[in-house]
Amino acid sequence: MIGGGPGGLYFACLAKQLDPAREITVWERNPPGDTYGFGVVFSDETLGGIEHADPVIHERMAESFARWDDIDVHYGGTVVTSGGHGFAAMSRRHLLRILRERAGELGVDVRFDAPAPPVANLRRDYDLVVAADGMNSTARRSDDASFGATYENRRCRYIWFGTDKVFDAFTFDVRSTPAGVMQVHAYPYDATGSTLIVEMTEDVWQKAGFAASPAVVAPETLVPGDSDDYAIERCEELFGDLLGCDTSTGRRYRLIGNHSRWINFTTLRCERWHDGNLVLLGDAAHTAHFSIGSGTKLAMEDALALVACLAESPDLPSALTAYQAERQPVVVSTQRAAQASLEWFENLRQYVGQPPLRFAFNLLTRSRRVTYENLQIRDPEFVAAVDDWFAVSVGQPRRPPMFHPITLRGMTVANRVLVSAMDMYSSTDGHPGDFHLVHLGSKALGGAGLVMTEMVCVSPSGRITPGCTGLWTDEQRDGWARITSFVHEQSPAKIGIQLGHSGRKGSTKLMWEGIDDPLPDGNWPVVGPSALPYRPVNQIPRALTVDDMTDIRRQFVSAAQRAADAGFDLLELHCAHGYLLSSYLSPLTNRRDDDYGGSLRNRLRYPVEVFDAIRAVWPADRPCSVRISATDWAPGGVEVKDAVEIARTFAEHGVDAVDVSTGQVVSHERPAFGRSYQVPYADAIRNALAASHPHVAVIAVGAISSYDDVNSLLLAGRADLCALGRTHLFDPQWTLHAAADQGYLMPWPKPFAAGSRRPQTGRTDGPKPRLDLIRDPLAGVTLHGRWRPSQDAMPTPPRVNIGSAG
Ligand SMILES: Cc1cc2nc3c(=O)[nH]c(=O)nc-3n(C[C@H](O)[C@H](O)[C@H](O)COP(=O)(O)OP(=O)(O)OC[C@H]3O[C@@H](n4cnc5c(N)ncnc54)[C@H](O)[C@@H]3O)c2cc1C
Ligand SMILES: Cc1cc2nc3c(=O)[nH]c(=O)nc-3n(C[C@H](O)[C@H](O)[C@H](O)COP(=O)(O)O)c2cc1C
């Protein structure tokens, strides 16, 4: 073992217990007890794993746990408390002492004050070398490429302190100071003190004068025990009221340093965790931002899994492969949540106008792991309070947030769910036919508040494929009128039309025949702001002249007039996904040197001209939205700050809603897909416009698939409406089903009323197990008088059970 941190020592203890014949040597460069940090936090789940693996260690840890349920959010002069969170923490020093002593009892050779020998020598002399030497692991850095290591340096500054104040809850304190917004995370770790971390963005840190502090030292000059005394003094001043004083003695609580200095968080990711007989563990393999509190927990869970894989596998290579296969997905998922959390804190200032209850809910759901439903289980009263606040703010009785109506100009939508625009490529000559009637009609019957058409093209050459619908003839208008009439007559849903022009992405095959591939024959010429093809196989577009642009603008106007006549409730201008108007917005696709290219202001000119023109003919009481790609996911392209400006400009021109999608602008994009992956962009836009344009609604879209997520996003103020695309292809009655599942009485279409309850499934009438604490000798699982969940539903089972295996 290189490194005697929690990961290394825990691995050594477990591995020695499972096979006492093993010779295990741990090299730790520091003396015993010399370590940074203060307290470590564990969730109940991790503690379960530790308890099953080695009850002795668990028992000793449990003796000194500080346990608490509450999270306090200090913000805007108030404290909002949410309960039921179940944490345990202890002093990091004490944890290391327990592990050290246990390792000694078990006969592990732990050498302190002993830098490890060169890794090449260890690899030669030992069967297995475990690099548990922390984030700056020399073992890993000796061959970063073998492990596919990447480092992402983040932009906030933070510092770890201890304090002799024992907080009685996990405490967040977010405050506006003259230098800007700062935040504190603090949690108790035993009866003597708490960990307290101060964090702020680089500019606030500079303004607050921390950069000038003589005590800031370069990491390489740091000696153990060095702390930034200036930071301690300043932070005591800044957070003196939070620290408070001992009421019995009047003594002020203090901040305490321990290797404390300002740092920027680095997220380390490794593609591979082992190479020959060298394996990475804990911080040497990955880091996750402290705001989801999991460095020590992940290191100990890695240790557990590695020991189990060594015990279960026939040889070393397969054990190491199994270890990575087991742990990497868990770590990647934790890192994804940690990334959402760290970005939330980096962008904290955008939320500082939110009312306290919403702010607290937003903070608690920031990593997307904790949701509306989780919080309802943990603390129903807290969720009820936030629900009540939301209901009052929208002037309605309390109900699940997604079922609150919303009004845009003269249109009131019954709930906050949209069927996102989805091209069906099922039209002939641009006509909406029976397919479109059934497709959109069934979605309207399915309960969504607003059903969007696919991108409806303003001209034959503005189509993406020969199967796209259009609105350049009166016959097409009448076809659409048949659909809007059905929706209005048969459902409470509203129906919106998305108008667009394909630009350089036109003249391609139907989606299922080859998305974005040119037609085998019958291609029509394509156009764009500049003569840049989407991909080398696509046509080079003709750069539009100003006269051409005027013609296309007129096509949009005619289509808008027909859309009004066809009875649509909302008109959306498609300025996303690399189609014509989107390609004006992106600097990667717009290289014009006239008034329509160059600066963002110029790139916005044509899309805004089109918007103004359609707004002028669209009925004044009906709303208009615009869909944008809020990032191109490519260097040099549109980024979130541009997206905010784009949204703001449309808001100034009278848009009623901004539908926030991303990407599909350039073929070399690198999107970071994942659950609700586009929501941070909607969030940034919504909160940026909240003060100046509170009536502009923001629509979030992209892998939002559960009603729990919809409720969470709405309550947190990340969006006003949620659009779901593929989910509605899976379940056209998604909103009706979501209402039934939440026990919300939503009117069903009368002919469907008989089916408005979820069909009954098979019943199990067997007696329930009554006894507590039944040992399962195979899995080592303890059953606590309840049905054992099916294997699928079970969390990662405990892997090592030295206690009962004897
Ligand atoms: C300044 C700081 C403060 C922190 N405070 C906290 C906190 O209060 N609470 C919390 O939960 N988490 C804290 N963390 C994060 C947490 O410490 C880690 O996520 C966790 O300790 C990871 O455990 P590990 O065993 O993988 O690595 P580490 O705990 O980093 O242990 C690695 C060990 O390897 C040793 N080592 C490195 N190189 C060599 C070598 N060549 N030879 C011999 N020994 C070597 C190091 O001295 C160290 O003891 C802190 C991190 C930092 C950087
Ligand atoms: C088959 C299909 C067709 C789509 N067509 C359009 C379209 O015409 N206009 C548009 O803006 N987005 C279109 N999209 C994107 C969706 O509106 C939505 O933004 C995307 O699918 C992400 O949401 P989801 O994860 O809920 O599906 C399409 C998506 C799919 C799956």
Image (spheres, rainbow, N blue to C red):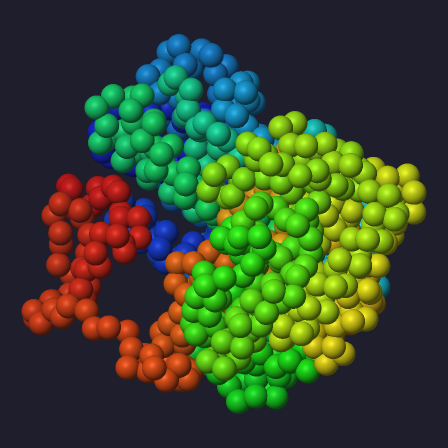
User: Which quarter of the image is occupied by the N terminus?
Assistant: top left
Location of residue 224 by image quarter: top right
Tell which of 577 and 285 is nearer to you: 577
Q: Is residue 116 left or right of residue 217?
A: left
Outermost left residue: 766
Residue situated in front as seen by the camera: 625 or 599: 625
Front in this rendered view, residue 611 or 370: 611
Q: Position of residue 395 (x, y in %)?
A: 61, 88
Q: Quadrant of residue 407?
A: bottom right
> How far from the left and from the top, in percent, is residue 701?
57, 59
Report which quarter residue 573 is drawn in: bottom right
Q: Residue at x 55, y 32 (%)?
A: 520
Q: Is residue 758 visible?
A: yes
As drawn, is 539 to the left or to the right of 230?
A: left
Quadrant of the rendering where the C terminus is positioned? top left
- Relative vertical location of residue 617 with respect to residue 502 in this rendering, above or below: below
Compared with residue 402, is residue 560 higher up or lower down, i.e. above or below? above
